Image (cartoon, grey):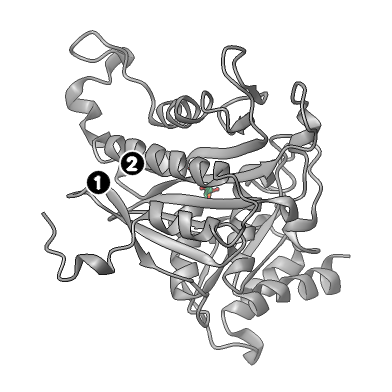
């Protein structure tokens, strides 16, 4: 059990979100409760990720464990956890996630709410088998229509419309980081009391120390992106060389750069003609993190302009993403304009 020197200094996530709600006298508490539902989902998923390596012992063979139960893949489990903890509450009108081709309407037996949830249940899931950090990303929009069945177009809102966004990082500890448009706040899960406690209030991105990109794919990048990368490495003397860090889990790479200062990018590339815009998804990866970056004094670009201004045209649309330190991220637009257009 953690020994808290001064329990009155403890701010739980519930208290913090409630206090933020009081900034808006018109608030009904619905958004507060969605965030709280997601924090609970984060705890449930974290309790599984910490046991991920035990799948071998418990029996991953043929996806059936020793008790004869089917062992569910962690990303599927994470998806179901978020859906099951949010779809019956009367707070949401629909959900869209990386795991489902179409959006999920609210089942008929449950009341409909006015918010839409977009999420990536387990970002970086290819890292799970190697005990590397993973995360859950989410974004919350108001639905566009007052009532009636939800249509897919209601999900095609630019990131500027986000009411709140955040992520849960499952790393050496579990952290819940969110913004509802009043700064970015981070909470660390204390497993001994089972609660997220405010550990990183009002996060602002410090001076850049790192750049994060999969350099292995450099040969597939445009000339502008190659020169931008050389710029970050200090060629030409524009900046002091930045240190390279790349985990291959967007949430974790972003989280480190948010706290330590830096820029992450996954550019458009020619590696796979089916994915000319790179690998990352606009709706439930780029947009939620872009909202956080801007709230923390940073910026997110697709190489031509702000990520948050793009109007999506499909649920699983991909986008190039440059995100983090404001100046360094904006700089890529100069390189791309100068070389690639
Ligand atoms: P993953 O495929 O493991 O889910 O969202 C996709 C993602 O991970 C990001 O988290 C990560 O930044 C990126 O892919 C890594 O891709 P590369 O292996 O191509 O670098």
- Quick one: 100 or 296, which is closer to the camera? 296
Q: Where is residue 65? Give x, y as percent.
A: 23, 15
Which residue is most to the bottom?
237
What is the tally of numbered marks visible in this picture?
Answer: 2
Q: Where is residue 77? Give x, y as percent.
A: 40, 27
121 relative position to 130: left or right: right
Q: Which residue is mark 2?
A: 43
73 relative position to 160: left or right: left
Residue drawn where x is 61% and y is 37% of the image: 117
Q: Where is residue 339? Give x, y as percent.
A: 83, 71
72 relative position to 316: left or right: left
Q: Residues within 10 Å of mark 1 (few under 14, many from 20)?
A: few
Residue drawn where x is 66% and y is 26% of the image: 103
- Quick one: 217 or 259, which is closer to the camera? 259
Q: Is residue 243 visible?
A: yes
Q: Secondary structure at mark 2?
A: helix
Cβ atoms at labels 1 and 2 below 8 Å apart: yes
Residue drawn where x is 38% and y is 39% of the image: 40
Q: Residues within 10 Å of mark 2 (few under 14, many from 20)?
A: many
Image mark for residue 194: 1
Q: Is residue 246 visible?
A: no
Q: Is residue 2 above or below residue 328?
A: above
- Quick one: 256 or 4, which is closer to the camera? 4
Q: Where is residue 193? Give x, y as percent.
A: 20, 49
Residue 312 quadrant: top right
Which label's residue is closer to the chain start, 1 or 2?
Answer: 2
Q: Is residue 11 above or below residue 75?
A: below
**Label 1 vs label 2, nearer the camera:** 1
Task: Tell me the quarter of the image containing the C terminus.
Answer: bottom right
Image mark for residue 162: none
């Amino acid at each position: 059990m953690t020994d808290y020197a001064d329990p009155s200094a403890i701010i739980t996530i519930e208290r913090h979100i409630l206090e933020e709600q009081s900034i808006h006298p018109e608030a009904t508490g619905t958004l507060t409760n969605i965030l709280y539902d997601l924090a609970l989902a984060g705890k449930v998923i974290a309790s599984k990720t910490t046991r991920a390596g035990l799948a071998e012992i418990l029996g991953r063979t043929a996806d059936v464990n020793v008790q004869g139960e089917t062992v569910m893949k962690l990303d599927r489990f994470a998806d179901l956890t978020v859906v099951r903890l949010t779809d019956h509450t009367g707070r949401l009108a629909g959900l869209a996630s990386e795991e489902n081709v179409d959006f999920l309407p609210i089942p008929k037996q449950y009341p409909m709410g006015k918010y839409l949830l977009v999420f990536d249940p387990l970002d970086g899931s290819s890292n799970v088998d190697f005990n590397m950090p993973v995360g859950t990303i989410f974004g919350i929009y108001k639905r566009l229509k007052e009532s009636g069945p939800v249509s897919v177009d209601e999900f095609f809102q630019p990131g500027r419309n986000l009411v709140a966004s955040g992520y849960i990082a499952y790393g050496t500890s579990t952290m819940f980081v969110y913004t509802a448009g009043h700064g970015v706040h981070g909470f660390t899960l204390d497993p001994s009391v089972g609660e997220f406690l405010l550990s990183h209030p009002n996060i602002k991105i410090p001076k850049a120390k790192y750049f994060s990109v999969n350099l292995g794919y450099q040969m597939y990048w445009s000339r502008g992106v190659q020169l931008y990368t050389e710029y970050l490495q200090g060629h030409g003397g524009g900046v002091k060389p930045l240190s390279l860090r790349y985990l291959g889990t967007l949430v974790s790479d972003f989280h480190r750069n948010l706290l330590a200062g830096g820029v992450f990018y996954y550019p458009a590339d020619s590696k796979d003609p089916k994915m000319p815009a790179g690998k990352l998804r606009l709706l439930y990866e780029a947009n939620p993190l872009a909202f956080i970056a801007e709230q923390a004094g940073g910026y997110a670009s697709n190489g031509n302009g702000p990520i948050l201004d793009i109007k999506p045209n499909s649920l699983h649309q991909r986008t190039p993403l440059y995100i983090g330190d404001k100046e360094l991220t904006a700089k890529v637009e100069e390189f791309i304009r100068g070389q690639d257009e």
